[in-house]
């Protein structure tokens, strides 16, 4: 079944060798790290300042970290240090077939890199997951401590998404991936911010509301009028980044 996941769940893109730090003006620090099952992964660490909050970013199922550079720049400009990494099979990371378990192992390894190598304390760290990455960040929050969890364009499970896109046909029966964020959120006590565009045509906002409804308090909902699946930060603009900054500040104080 997991063979079909490569066509219906994961959409990695190959790496493009360019001078990304020079082109973007960002202090992109190349980071190589290894997972518990031996995969060698690549990411960028961008440090705003030594004492600033650190965001561990689990991106969505398509492209690679290059596709997140515009968003990364804006997060850095708001004063966040960010660790953005590619899963196995994505970008510069080792070419291994992506799997749900593999994604989780990749996120554990990224977290362990921050805490063990960079000595980032959990109370300074916020986990951020977008789309499929929201499920990965939710799993990470269930296994590792952090001050807060931000879930954007998220969905309860692969089953819920399949039912939306295939008219009720149980396409999920033929897939190995489940990504059941809905099973983790009722047990997570850390503060949560759940963000969704009301014009999302990939993950309808109703699925985002289901994620919010099952989440254990404390939790906040932030809907973005007119935003689709991948443009939340652009459409949300100043209000979006103000809400993120406010949530991060409160989460760090409450830890």
Image (tube, rainbow, N blue to C red):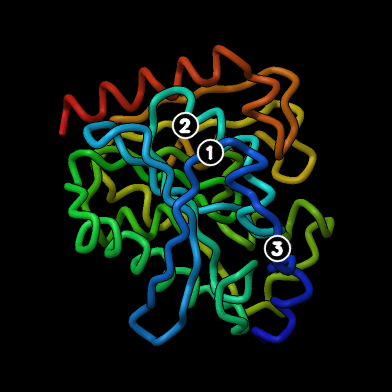
216 relative position to 198: left or right: left
Q: Position of residue 144 (x, y in %)?
A: 24, 58
Mark in the foreground, 2 or 3: 3
28 relative position to 229: left or right: left
Image point 49% across, 31% down: which residue? 75
| Residue placed most toward the observer, 239 or 117 | 117
Q: Earlier in the sequence, mark 2 or mark 1?
A: 1
Q: Quadrant of residue 88?
A: bottom right
| Residue placed most toward the observer, 222 or 20 | 20
Disc 3 marks which residue? Answer: 17
Q: Position of residue 130 (x, y in %)?
A: 56, 46
Task: Evaluate if marks 2 and 3 touch, with contact meaning CB atoms under 8 Å apart.
Answer: no
- Give the Cα distance between marks 2 and 1: 8 Å
Q: What number is the disc on residue 76?
A: 2
The answer to whether residue 247 shows anywhere in this view is yes
Q: Quadrant of the C terminus?
A: top left
Q: Position of residue 119 (x, y in %)?
A: 18, 54
**Element on which disc 3 rests:** loop
Q: Earlier in the sequence, mark 3 or mark 1?
A: 3
Q: What number is the disc on residue 149?
A: none
183 relative position to 15: left or right: left
Q: Residues within 10 Å of mark 3 (few under 14, many from 20)?
A: few
Image point 42% across, 31% down: which residue? 193
Q: Quadrant of the N terminus?
A: bottom right
Disc 1 marks which residue? Answer: 26
Task: Evaluate if marks 2 and 1 touch, with contact meaning CB atoms under 8 Å apart.
Answer: yes
| Residue placed most toward the observer, 216 or 139 | 139
């Amino acid at each position: 079944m997991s063979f079909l996941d490569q066509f219906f769940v994961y959409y990695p893109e190959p790496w493009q060798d360019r001078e990304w730090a020079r082109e973007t003006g960002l202090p992109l620090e190349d980071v190589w790290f290894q997972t518990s099952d031996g995969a060698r992964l690549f990411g960028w660490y961008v440090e705003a300042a030594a004492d600033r909050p650190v965001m561990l970013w689990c991106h969505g199922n398509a492209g690679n970290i290059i596709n997140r550079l515009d968003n990364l720049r804006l997060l850095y400009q708001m004063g966040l240090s960010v660790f953005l990494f590619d899963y196995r099979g994505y970008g510069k990371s080792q070419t291994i077939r992506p799997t749900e378990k593999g994604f989780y192992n990749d996120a554990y390894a990224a977290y362990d890199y921050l805490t063990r190598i960079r000595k980032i304390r959990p109370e300074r760290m916020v986990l951020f997951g977008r789309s499929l990455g929201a499920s990965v960040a939710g799993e990470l929050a269930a296994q590792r401590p952090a001050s807060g969890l931000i879930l954007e364009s998220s969905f309860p499970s692969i089953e819920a998404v399949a039912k939306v896109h295939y008219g009720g046909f149980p396409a999920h029966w033929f897939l190995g991936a489940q990504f059941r964020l809905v099973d983790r959120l009722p047990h997570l006590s850390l503060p949560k911010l759940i963000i969704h565009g009301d014009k999302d045509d990939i993950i309808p906002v109703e699925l985002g509301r289901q994620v919010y409804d099952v989440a254990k308090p404390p939790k906040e909902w932030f809907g973005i009028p007119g935003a689709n699946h991948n443009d939340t930060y652009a459409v949300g603009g100043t209000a979006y980044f103000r809400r993120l900054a406010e949530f991060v500040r409160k989460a760090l104080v409450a830890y």
